[in-house]
Amino acid sequence: MESLIFPFGRRKVKVNIPKANLLQVLKTKKCKAVTNEVEEIKKALQNPIGVPPLNEIVKPRDKVTIVISDKTRPVPNRKIVPCILNELNKTGVRDITILVALGMHKKNTRIELEHMLGKRILEKVKVLNHEAFNKNMVNYMGDTSRGTPIEVNKLVSNSDVKIITGYIEPHEFAGFTGGRKSILPGVSSVNSIKWNHRPEMLENPKAKIGILEGNPIHEDMVEAAKIVGVDFMINVTLNDKKEITKVVAGDFLKAYQEGVNFYKQYAMVKVAQQADIVITSSGYPLDCDFYQSVKSIITAELIVKEGGTIILLTESKDGVGPRLFHYWLEKVSSQAELFEKIKKEDFRPELDHCYLLAKVLKKCKVIVVSSQQQLKKIKLLTVVNSVKKALNMAFKNEGRKAEVIALPYATMLIPEVMKG
């Protein structure tokens, strides 16, 4: 047996796979953390790419908004935000607000915000949650060339200086996380998100993990950020220990591209061939609910054979996910029925992962390992409470000689299946 470690929530679990069946273990290349994370953040802020430093951009009477990621993203906000505030304090500016880019996610509670930012920042700076479903919270700023209406949080549209933060890793249809995503979907209305995430965009062959060039969803997001007018960006890349490996700051396109190029060096992994069984997970916070965990399934789908089996390990501590996503998954009994409903009914952005999950289920079977009881009500899924049971089922499906690929930390990778 080969014993492998997979992340599961905030802990690790051991998965035993017969050596004769194990085809490959996919991991990012080793990438050292920076020596001093705070010093690296300060250095990036003071030597930005493509724009002047903050002390030259910000004037004392400006209204400044800092957009940060929510609890579902492992962004080291406790280190990034204090460094930004220190730079802003040098300018004499007093009107500073931190806005949590929730997209369509649930509001972060006071306790969650305290965990993300620290008690001291919450006491000194106004921190607000974005509300995508609140029409009174957004301003319309125009349309992109693809017809997406740009409706963003009034706090952002009315600010003199807009600073976005985040982290860079592969994304299931935007190519990569971070950068422009702080605006769309981060602080946009549900209507804007709906148009950016519509099936026509999701179906584009370039709307894939690790692709930016020609990706309509990415390009639409970039247009939105340009319309809104982002003044400064700071993003980080992380290793599997959630340590900072690089910091990029400055122009939201130039600095972002540098971060993406750096990340690609250790995220792209070659896969000899597709496997009968793929075992995957991501760990906290990307397995906080099943909606987020679908990202691991989408990466696994790239390397599983037609008709094969994906085994997903997910804690899903917070349940299934957004209300509509949860409702639809409980309502349908097959992926065909899910596709049919999406075609018949008005597409809503909470259904993007329903749509993507349905596409995966059209290709292969999915077994979920979780103790979350809510998942057992979803007829589309086979849910079990142990990895051993899931593997036994998978080998029964695929045969005792089935080849297995292990994919821990799935969302950090860009798998490339070798041809020929």
Image (tube, helix red, strand yellow):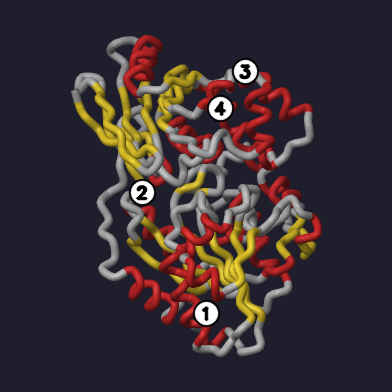
Q: Which mark is residue 4?
A: none
SS label for mark 2 = helix
Relative side of 332 to 254, left or right: right
> Residue 150 at x, y = what percent?
74, 59
Residue 204 can be seen in this image? yes
Give amino acid for label 4: Gln
Give amino acid for label 3: Ser
SS label for mark 3 = loop
Inter-mark Cα distance, 1 to 3: 51 Å
Inter-mark Cα distance, 4 to 1: 48 Å
Q: Residue at x 37, y 27 (%)?
A: 278
Q: Which mark is residue 334?
A: 3
Residue assigned mark 1? 51
Q: Earlier in the sequence, mark 4 or mark 3?
A: 3
Q: Nearer the viewer, mark 2 or mark 4?
A: 4
Inter-mark Cα distance, 2 to 4: 33 Å
Residue 227 image-quadrant placement: bottom right
Give amino acid for label 1: Val
- Marks 4 and 3: CB-CB under 8 Å? no
Residue assigned mark 2? 267
